[in-house]
Image (cartoon, grey):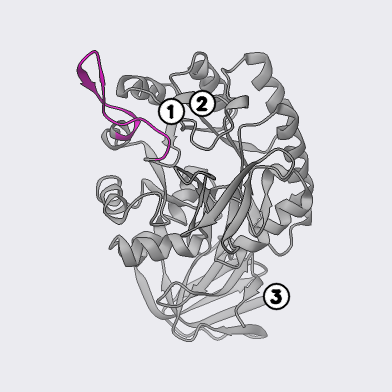
Amino acid sequence: MHRIKIINGNIITPYRLLERGTIIIEDGIISCVTREEVPVQEAVVIDAEGHYVAPGFIDIHTHGGGGFDFMDATVEAYLGAAETHARYGTTSIVPTTLTSTNEGLRQSFEAFRKSKTLNKQGAELIGIHLEGPYFSLEQKGAQDPRYIRVPIREEYEKIFEWSDDIIRWSAAPEIEGVLEFGRYARKKGVLMSIGHSDATGEKVAEAFENGFSHITHLYSAMSGVKRINALRVSGVIESAFLTDEMTVEIIADGIHIPADLLHLVYKIKGPSRTVLITDSMRGAGMGEGPSILGSLKDGMEVFVEDGVAKLPDRKAFAGSVATADRLVRTMVKSAGVPLIDAIRMISITPAKVIGIDDRKGSLAQGKDADIVIFDSDIDIKTTIIKGKTVYEKK
């Protein structure tokens, strides 16, 4: 039996901090989490040196990183992006597609399927998130308008036939046919999320009743309060706050959403209903300069500067280049959120949202040994996935 013993760590559980605690891992599974010293024979010892020890970060919305995009539809892209994010503390990811041709989707599905078994050094590939193509053109953001369309049952049935790995789908509920599509997808166990939507609050309430339980990147590419025939009506943003059971995700890079609004989301929705996501494109983990949003052969030229990707005319953001450590750092250092709560929002909360909290998301006996060690600046020292150290800062 392969054993690992982590000592001298300030262990973060969902609700408390165990100072100078100990974690025992046996064959990739956590067998003990305690404040006490535990004698273990023939164990590899990892000294956390007083740093924080937390559950591995779970990113349920990312398009890539390290120069790779999942729409490249290659094994190299999936493995490269997964390895990049592991260096920043992410142990599980839900690769996300962009609005595209169906052939582009099918090729990406196939690359995901092949990559799952080959992925030895990167964040675990949990399942696929389809972002689009059933969106509002008024709220398209950086999604390619050439491929935005209304759902046709024959089409989405075919997409589901192509892959058993789809676990999440974002769509705009006000679009004709989307509620029927959402009911169909929910029966297949897919998390339905409202995104790139210009819906009114009334339509959001109807969508929630039809299985849409999550909000894709709150504040980004969605309606707020607006006037219709001189009367004010609520939008997706207000409805997300009003519906207590609705979970939300936020791009906490400090740029897409300012610190005061990050704190507002935290204050209203709380750490058990708020998920931190990178929504990162291929520029994550890279330097500033030109980049491509989407696939190399069919993507959009963008420019990375000031910590974000922008459209060439600089009039709008084109995507995030955040990594998970930056999200936590922003929430703690800028938005004033307690560290334990920030960690909840990138570990146990996303695990619950996508239904993997039985094995991931917290440091508890019987769960996968997905663990990250970092200092007070959220600088990642070690990333462990299922008991294997995949990154160690030199």
Q: Secondary structure at mark 2?
A: loop
Question: What residue is shown with label 3?
Answer: 2
* Spatial separation of the CA atoms under disc 1 and disc 3: 49 Å
On the rendered image, what quadrant is the C terminus found in? bottom right
Tell me if I can see residue 373 in this picture: yes
Residue 240 at x, y percent in the picture = 33, 35
Q: Which stretch did the figure color magenta?
A: 220-237
Residue 163 at x, y percent in the picture = 72, 33
Question: What residue is shown with label 2?
Answer: 135
> At label 3, which amino acid type do we have?
His
Q: Are marks 2 and 1 in contact (CB under 8 Å)?
A: yes
Question: What residue is shown with label 1?
Answer: 197
> Which mark sits nearer the N-terminus, 3 or 2?
3
Q: Is residue 224 in the magenta section?
A: yes
Q: Secondary structure at mark 3?
A: loop
> Which mark sits nearer the N-terminus, 1 or 3?
3
* Spatial separation of the CA atoms under disc 2 and disc 1: 6 Å
